[in-house]
Amino acid sequence: MAEEKIDSSGYWKANVRLITGCLIVWAFVSYGMAILFRPLLSGIPVGGTDLGFWFAQQGSILTFIALIFFYAWKMNKLDQKFGLGE
Amino acid sequence: MSQFAINLLFVGASFALYIGIAIWARAGSTKDFYVAGGGVHPVTNGMATAADWMSAASFISMAGLLASGGYANSSFLMGWTGGYVILAMLLAPYLRKFGKFTVPDFIGDRFYSKAARLVAVICLIVASVTYVIGQMTGAGVAFSRFLEVSNTWGIWIAAAIVFLYAVFGGMKGITYTQVAQYIVLIIAYTIPAVFIAFQLTGNPIPMFGMFSTHSESGVPLLQKLNEVVVALGFQDYTADVDNKLNMVLFTLSLMVGTAGLPHVIIRFFTVPKVADARWSAGWALVFIALLYLTAPAVGSMARLNLSTTIYPEMAGQVEDVESALQSSIQHGEITTTDAAGYALASEWTDHPDVPEWMVTWAETGLIKFRDLNNDGRIQMYNDSADFSHLGWEGSELEVNNDIMVLANPEIANLPAWVIGLIAAGGIAAALSTAAGLLLAISSAISHDLIKTMINPNISEKGEMLAARISMAGAILLATYLGLNPPGFAAQTVALAFGIAGASLFPALMMGIFSKRVNNKGAVAGMLTGLILTLLYIFTYLGWFFIPGTNMLANTPDNWILGISPLSFGAVGAIFNFAVAFTVSSMTEEPPQEIQDLVESVRYPKGAGGAVDH
């Protein structure tokens, strides 16, 4: 085992960093764009209403999907890089 | 063929399919029974997760909630999808790596404590039972309408079928049946939505139609909707909310609750690898989003259709009415606001012309209309707005939110087979979720309580028998509560989220991301989260939801900082984290083998040096 010692703390740190980044985007689109910043965005019209409304009912969900696939893809690369793939 | 026969045909054919699959894939071992043998493809699992996840609340109630609440109820959309992001990143892969059967398994092992396991079992059962209530009420609505029986009978029939079904399958049967149920429910949901979007806007894709132009009036659909509802004295459909704190906390409660719901988590135990658990969460959300992106369109269009069908002549004669009203305004007889309301309400005709769908739905008791002022017309408007000078004595139409999706095809005059399809879809949604919940409940009792804590020597056969008996108990309890529900189906479900989010989610997350949190901290944190949340909910909704036992009226004035009981799960979770860290830091570190266990769940391969002996 010794010679193929895996840098597991490096892997975990990279994972936590990636999660943090993804969760910032996650919070920004849902709590930010759709709720807290909606009054600021009310000047941007989207089909009879405003951008905040669109984020609340469509945009945040689309972003969530992109985030999970991005995370899964990045983690697969990390698994390979650190030799932790199954 | 009558509508009843068509409904029976669609529902019957879908049942035959599910039971066929359940027999084909029935469980032979406890591993089959609990985690489907652990060999489910990530896309298949994603689809099954979506069906498991999308309950009666999603299928039946959500569009109704959006229709009645407009923007303010967007929390349901974001909460129930955003939870998958944290599930995919914070829980699913590590729990898959841990590789056991149940959620209490992880909590019991990680916090090396029977007490922690027991608390987890209790949280799981409370959350799942609360959640199953929503399924029962939802299925009751669908059955009562489409099989033409009373709501009460509908719930009993749903209970009988769900029971049969869950006992048959085990996780293996449930997984493959859920794939079929997903297909049925998504087709059933989208076809009417496509029809209606096309009718109203000329754009067949509901998620785009919602933001395009209303063909009849030539203004954007949402703007048209705002005009109609405001005229009737309701709040603007897209109006912003005043209490942002409550909306944020409610959304967060639904998100952490989603991630903490055991029946969703155990789905990720069924895939072969850690990487599959991550992909699978993504696929699950794709399949879920197909419905959730359509729901807002269904909600807004149903609300518009409901208003315009009740005033069937409005569309054609609105100009005549308007010119008549304009002259009344000029003569100072009425104000502009009255005129708008009057234009909408005045064209309602005598009872014999009540649309047929209203008559059939009135039989289920979910629509009530009565002519309060005996003018031969039905006025529907916001009851708190005063139209008494027009001779109106109160809103004469009550519509239960839950019928929005189910009645939608009838309101829009869609062909009979679409209505049959909706029937099969609504029932599929309720049954697939109920089956998943019952599995989570029964595995917690048979595996975590009986096998692990009471009688470790129990045989496989005995364990499966115990699982089936505990399902029976759970469903009886759920049926009782389904007959006496604390709110709309989706709101009942929201309570389950508060509990799962306040108790289970923080414990699972700390178990993975902190090596320092020990048994005492975890137990104290989980109990704090659970008890605080329950106390807050019971204070406003009554002890154990028994009507009349609430200590404070459930109104925003009474809520602490304006936080609704449904939003309190997030606050409970914060207390859970705080208490767990404080208690852990004052007591001893977890033993080395537990820290090694934490290391091992963090890495997909059995690596991490010390663990890999």
Image (tube, rainbow, N blue to C red):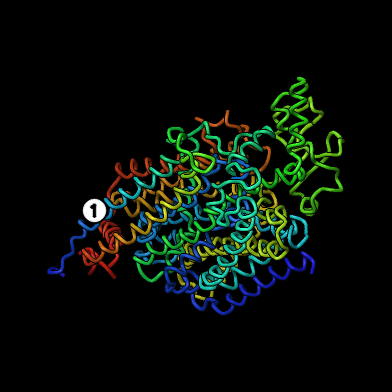
Judge whether residue B450 can be spotted in this image: no
Residue under the point 35% across and 50% down: B510
Q: Secondary structure at mark 1?
A: helix
Where does the image place residue B41, in percent across and percent down from the top left?
43, 72
Of the residues shown, which amino acid type is indicated by label 1? Lys
Where residue B444 appears, as percent x and y from the top left, is 50, 61
Left or right, B50 with reference to B97: right
Query: Most extreme residue toward the top, as rendered?
Result: B332
In this rendering, would A5 be left or right of B342?
Answer: left
Q: In this image, B25 relative to B85: left or right?
A: right
**Frontmost residue, B371 versus B490:** B371
Question: Disc 1 sits on a residue from what chain?
Answer: A
Query: Which quadrant is home to the N terminus of chain B?
Result: bottom right
> Where is residue B569 drawn, in percent x and y?
48, 43
Residue underneath mark 1:
A13
| Residue B244 seen anywhere in this rendered image of the structure | yes
Q: In this orientation, which residue lies closer to the viewer: A44 or B173?
A: A44
Give the image location of residue B238, x and y in percent. 56, 38
Q: In front: B129, or B564?
A: B564
In which quadrant will I find the C terminus of chain B? bottom left
Of B178 and B476, which appears nearest the observer?
B178
Name which residue lies at 69% across and 34% down.
Answer: B232
Residue at 68% x, 41% y is B547
